[in-house]
Image (cartoon, rainbow, N blue to C red):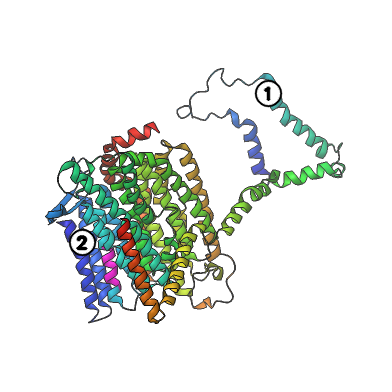
Amino acid sequence: MAAPLLVLMVLALAGGLIHVPTESVFAAPGHGEHQVSTLMHSIMIAVPLLGIALSYLFYGSRTLSVERLMSNNVARGLHRFWFAGWGFDGLYRRLFITPYLWLAAINKRDVVDTASEFLVILSEAGNAMLARSQSGSLRWYILSVVGGTVLLITLGGVL
Amino acid sequence: MTLLWILLLLFFGGVLAWLSEIFDSRFPRWIALLSVVATFIPLLQLYGSFDAQRESLWIIEFSRSWIPSLGINFMLAIDGLSLLLVGLTSFLGIIAVGAAWVEIRDRAGFFYFNLLWTLAGVVGVFTAIDLFLFFFFWEVMLIPMYFIIAIWGHENKRYAATKFFLYTQFTGMLLLVSLLCLVYFFTIQYGYLSFAYEDLLRLEVGGKLEMWLMLGFFIAFATKLPSVPFHSWLPDAHSQAPTAGSVLLAGVLLKTGAYGLIRFTLPLFPESSAQFTPVALTLAVISILYCAKVALAQSDIKRLIAYTSVSHMGFVLLGIYAWNLIGLQGAMMTMLAHGLSAAALFSLAGGLQGRLHTRDMRRMGGLWALVPRMAVVALFFSVAALGMPGLGNFVGEFLSLLGVFSVSIWAAALAALGMIVASVYSLWVMQAVFQGAQNPEEDQALLSDLDARELALYGLMMMGLILLGLFPNAFLDVSAIALEHLSSASDAFVAVRGRL
């Protein structure tokens, strides 16, 4: 079990010394453009060393106790938070998944289709109205013919 | 002559298939298959003899006087773009006949007649360069398709067929009105009547009037494409159509809309199209994202695939209105790849419906163990549809996005989100249908896996998609001259868009 970890450890420490031939792909780093300050450098070097020291105190010399740390509420909360990957899954669910599924669910029947539904209702209503007018009683037929004639004559007069 | 030969083969093949039913009910399908295969051979020949260094635009032309007193000629011509699309039509014609092979038993003769006449209409649309002839073929492909849905469709076929007919017929009328106005202005300016494409290209209408004429063309083609907000006929038509009808609808009929935009709308009305570009790009982005979202909510598997079709055609619209070579190539590749992948997905949905007698995904699940071959094929095509690199859809969508990036960064960025939502619905379908628990209500022990006929059809489409994905240049080179010519001929378009 330890062998692969050891290999990775050695590479992590000394891997930077291996020369990777990428000059032809990436431009040579510009001078003076990305100068990192000395303070920044020191912090970057100090943080891993601090980590090693802390883990030695916790697990090596046992000067500090894990149990005591975990009895603290804040520490427990942080532990849960980090264990859940900084809560990214939950954030994702709340920010993207739930709203997207909700948006999809409320519009299953595609609101754009309402226009054609409306057309169907309109033509069915028109059909019902015309069907009712076909009553078989002659007086209505005569009346509609007269009405149409009046309309035609009026239109002719107006135009 | 070759073009006329292809058309006649389909028209007469259709009639012959119908008549042959008198002798034996198996004759029509064999005659249909022979006719479509016979159309594919001269196309392969044309493709083989294609010369990328050619000077002239049209590879072959055919022209006869038709109605000389109205300036209407029977003019057919084919360039690289139409060659690929006619090739796709012919290829999917073979697939459609294969898909109908056992599904259609009732009135088979009339079915294959309609199938072949739809194909003939589509081939005519892709090759006509007389606008009256174009409109004629535009209508020819509509009516047989209406019969295919209305006669051989599923439970709600009347509603779906009528909706399809009304949408396409009404917008077809807009196209006709615009077309007649265009010819009228041409006659006033040039003193003679002509419907010829190359004549009308010389006409400059300009101003508000051009915008109205352009909208007539745009709406007709955007309905066929379809693009939001003219898409709502498609889910109904697809869910009710028989499998072969879906294959034709998704595979080739939708492409006629895109072809119309590329060949007619933008070159004929460059200025107003350029002014219209922001609207068209917005519609494309809405189509991609909105329909992907609606697709996810569907429980009817065919409706779901229909909505994904609209979403993918958004990439085509995007590529077209980028109006540069890369964008147009992207639109063309998306058309070819989507033609294959959508046809395959609809065939699979039809295959599932044939076996389970339902399209409801809530009644499916865990089918991988029962029909493993079908599941693998479905996985392949859903992965293709979501844009896996190495398959055709990726090349098309990538080129579309690249083309539109130089025109509108926003449209490109928003449309790229479509690739993510595409994987959401594609994987969701796979999980809902093939993985998870099996539905205990269904008696699924009797399910049969894909047979040799089906495997051969899917194998052909897989090969096509891999070919498109790994050797895109075999196709891009063919359409390059035609698209270059189209996009560079419209200086007015680029000039106006530059000012926007």
Residue B64 in view here = no
Residue A70, x across and y down, in percent: 84, 44
Q: Is residue A117 magenta?
A: no
- Mark 2 nearby-residue class (10 Å; few <14, some 14–19, many ≥20): many
If the image is split into quadrants, where does the N terminus of chain B sit? bottom left
- Give the residue number, with chain letter if any, for mark 1: A40
Q: CA distance from mark 2 to mark 1?
A: 75 Å
- Label 1 chain ID: A
For the residue pair B73 and B206, the one nearer the viewer reads as B206
Task: Find residue A106 and report its image quarter.
Answer: bottom right
- Within 10 Å of disc 1 (Cα), the crowding (few <14, some 14-19, many 20+) is few
Amino acid type, label 1: Met
Residue B252 position in % (x across, y down): 33, 58
Identify the secondary structure beneath mark 2. Answer: helix
To which residue does mark 2 refer? B7
Q: Amino acid at mark 2?
A: Leu
Viewer-side label of 2, 1: 2
Q: Which residues are magenta?
A: B111-119
